[in-house]
Image: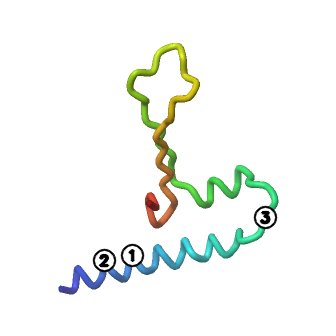
Amino acid sequence: MEKALEKVRDTKADIDRFADLIRKYTSFEKLDRFMLHELIDRITIYETPGMGRCRKGKEKRITIYYKFVGAIQ
């Protein structure tokens, strides 16, 4: 029970840290490299099946993993 409670506290702390970062950048005109490094953990771009030389019109699946909270659906 204590481990579950600790995990909830850690999750809440991570969400609070992410919320603080988002508040910091509520109004900006241009997304810069520093902001990306501070907000985003990683970006995964998946290979599109059936992709040959013709890539126009094909949709790619991209997942953005934000720091402290992971991927947001």
**Residue beneath disc 3:** 28
Task: Find the distance from the CA under tag 1 to the CA under tag 3.
Answer: 27 Å
Name the residue that disc number 1 marks: 11
Q: What residue sits 58% from the left and 24% below the top?
A: 56
| In the image: residue 6, left or right of residue 55 | left
- Alpha-carbon distance for marks 1 and 2? 6 Å
Query: Which mark is nearer the camera, 1 or 3?
Result: 3
Nearer to me, 16 or 61: 61
Residue ID at (56%, 29%): 57
Q: Residues within 10 Å of mark 1 (few under 14, many from 20)?
A: some
The residue singled out by tag 2 in the image is 7
Numbered disc 3: secondary structure? loop
Give the image location of residue 16, x and y in percent.
Answer: 52, 79
* Residue type for callout 1: Thr
Residue 9 in picture, x, y percent from top left: 37, 83
* Label 1 SS: helix
Q: Is residue 49 left or right of residue 59?
A: left
**Amino acid type indicated by mark 2:** Lys
